[in-house]
Amino acid sequence: VGDGNEVAHIDLLIGPRGSPAETAFVHCLTNNKDGFTSLLAVLTPNLLTKPATVMFNKVTIKGAKQAVQMFGPAQYAVAKAVADSVAEGVIPADEADDLFVCVGVFIHWEASDDKKIQNFNYAVSRGARHT
């Protein structure tokens, strides 16, 4: 979704407790490496989404600017897409506590427009849940 260096494409895995999605969720949170890190999707500090959602970068984070883009506009976009999916019934609210979501996010090294990063990642994350 989108264009230029801010183009957004994700890998998304969703599944119930006890599924490979839960295993991937735990592995993602406990297996950080230099240049590759995971973070929980939050709408604001300390406000986690339900279902629990972990994000990871698809390409090596090479500097502070790229890290801030991942931990800022991309993180908010994915969290908001998950929350909106529950609010609109795409993800059933009564199942949200038992689901796990893993989202791989691409942030280009030369991306510069945070608003586009947020808008494009929101759009692609919402679209992934509708397929």
Image: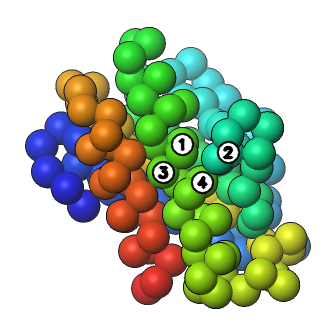
Please state the horizontal and vertical placement of residue 121, each as a whole percent of the image.
Answer: 38, 53
Circles 4 and 3: CB atoms closer than 8 Å = yes
Identity of the amino acid at label 3? Answer: Ala
Identity of the amino acid at label 1? Answer: Gln
What residue is disc 1 on? 75
State the CA–CA distance, disc 4 to disc 1. Answer: 6 Å
Identity of the amino acid at label 2? Answer: Val
Element class at badge 2? strand
Please state the horizontal and vertical placement of residue 27, each as a whole percent of the image.
Answer: 75, 47
Q: Residue at x 59, y 46 (%)?
A: 55
Among the two numbered marks 1 and 2 on one chain, the one whose residue lies closer to the N terminus:
2
Circles 4 and 1: CB atoms closer than 8 Å = yes
Q: Which residue is nearer to you in this view: 80 or 41?
A: 80
What residue is disc 4 on? 79
Element class at badge 4? helix
Q: Residue at x 42, y 58 (%)?
A: 122
State the CA–CA distance, disc 3 to disc 1. Answer: 5 Å
The vertical placement of 129 against 114, above or below, is below
Left or right: where 70 falls relative to 55: left
Q: Residue at x 76, y 49 (%)?
A: 48
Q: Which residue is nearer to you in this view: 29 or 114?
A: 114
Among the two numbered marks 2 and 4 on one chain, the one whose residue lies closer to the N terminus:
2
The label on residue 106 is: none
Element class at badge 3? helix
The vertical placement of 122 against 48, above or below, is below
Identity of the amino acid at label 4? Answer: Ala
Among the two numbered marks 2 and 3 on one chain, the one whose residue lies closer to the N terminus:
2
State the CA–CA distance, disc 2 to disc 4. Answer: 5 Å
What residue is disc 2 on? 42
Circles 1 and 2: CB atoms closer than 8 Å = yes
Q: Residue at x 53, y 63 (%)?
A: 81
Crowd tier of the residue under label 3, counting other residues whose Cα lies within 10 Å: few below 14, some 14–19, many 20 or above: many
